[in-house]
Amino acid sequence: MTEAEQDQAFGDAIARFGGALARLARACEADADLRRDLEQDIQVALWQSLASFDGRCSLSTWVWRVAHNRATSHIMARRRHTRQGWANIEDVELPAEDPTPFEQATNEQAAALIGSIIDRLDPPDRQIMLLYLEGVAATEIGEITGVSADAVATKVHRFKTMLTRRYARPGDAS
Amino acid sequence: MTPDDDDKLRRLWSRSDAALEPLSLAEVKSRAATFNSAIGRRNRREYIATAFVTLIFGLYALILPGALLKVGSLLVIVGGFVMAWQLSRRTSRPGPGAAAADVRAYYRAQLATEEQMLASVGLWYIGPLIPGLAVFMAGLARASGFASMSGFAAFAAIPLAIFFGIWLLNRRAAAMLREHIARIDAAAPATKGEME
């Protein structure tokens, strides 16, 4: 890839994925200054990586991988002390509470619960959930994360089941 | 909420006004030229400590009497540089190709690198300082004339205990990382050839 093509691909990627990259940074870093640093670090890593982009995977898969790997490095460096608390999605349990009808939960409450689950996950599972929330298909999530599409579907199902138990439909809560 | 509420979840997730502040291409390229600066910042404390050790033991080599003290001081300085070089070598950032590896392989490789660093801390972090400190302490013992062997042993036990504590803590951290790696492998077994 020539440098002009690299610049063009970078511009396209930022235009297409900019919002998702911002949400990724938000999910990985609460501190505003450090979040901005992470966003910038992702952009630099992305531009630099595109020099070796050879089309063996789609551009979107490439962008997701680079961005999520930089985010993973960031949380590994920033949160060494909490790392022992991370777990696979299969091992995460929410505290037992009565289910709340989803319609009664505020968006902030629901978003906070999603964030709290994601925050407890090992980076590979964390990235799977974030990619799912971005609307990436299970097959591509598998390609990005190195996990089979079946395993991705199982993990996403577990994630949704946890939310379902907490936020019941009207009539489900007893 | 039902398990089929994918759209609802995704709308909730993307409803925020999170927006990327794009860097200009010139800024991106400028930062790419100093891509390892973040690693450098992370290691800065160690480099400052090395500079401090160099300064102190450099002064010792100049002003303290006796060959053992001078040689020991110089060996400590050399050991400090070896340690800093090893730290820099072992924490260098993966290249652009590795940056686009799949997420699980990348994370596992990062953990494995860290585990190897911690497990071998005696070799590359503590080991290079031992010869210089041993010679230096022998020089101190000779210059101060310890009355008994037990007095020297007590004197030598302090740094040895510190080094042993560092070694032990790092070995423990390495063992925890090995457990972490095993958990990741168990959760999603690597495809053939992936772990090369």
Image (cartoon, rainbow, N blue to C red):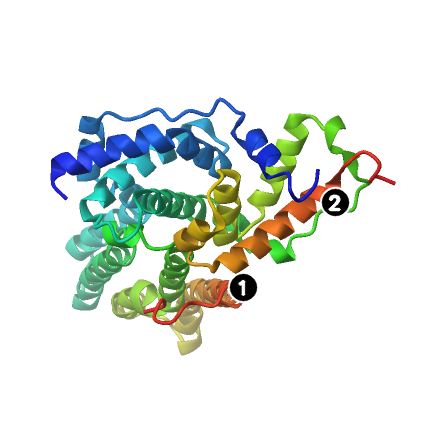
Residue at the image point whose x is 62% and y is 51% from the top: A157
Residue at the image point whose x is 88% and y is 40% from the top: A174
In the structure shown, which secondary structural element does the residue marked by tag 2 occupy? Answer: helix
Marks 2 and 1 on same chain? no
**Residue type, mark 2 in image:** Arg
Q: Quadrant of residue B45?
A: top left
Above or below residue A109? Residue B5 is below
Above or below residue A29? Residue A158 is below
Residue at the image point whose x is 28% and y is 56% from the top: B87
Residue B140 locus on image (x, y percent): 29, 65
- Left or right, residue A16 beside residue A54: right
Q: Which residue is mark 2?
A: A165
- Chain of the residue that carries numbered disc 1 in the rendered image: B
Q: Quadrant of the C terminus of chain B?
A: bottom left
Residue A50 locus on image (x, y percent): 22, 43
Residue B162 locus on image (x, y percent): 44, 62
- CB within 8 Å, label 2 to label 1: no
Q: Local crowd at mark 2 within 10 Å, few (<14), some, or many (≥20)? A: many
Q: Which of these two is toward me, B72 or B105?
A: B105
Q: Seen from this angle, which residue lies furthest bottom?
A: B149
**Residue type, mark 1 in image:** Ala
Q: CA distance from mark 2 to mark 1?
A: 23 Å
Residue at the image point whose x is 57% and y is 44% from the top: A118
Q: Local crowd at mark 1 within 10 Å, few (<14), some, or many (≥20)? A: some
Above or below residue A65? Residue B189 is below
In the structure shown, which secondary structural element does the residue marked by tag 1 occupy? Answer: helix
Residue B32 locus on image (x, y percent): 21, 38
Marker disc for residue B147? none
Q: Which residue is mark 1?
A: B187
- Chain of the residue that carries numbered disc 2 in the rendered image: A
Above or below residue B187? Residue B22 is above
**Is residue B137 among what the camera can see?**
no
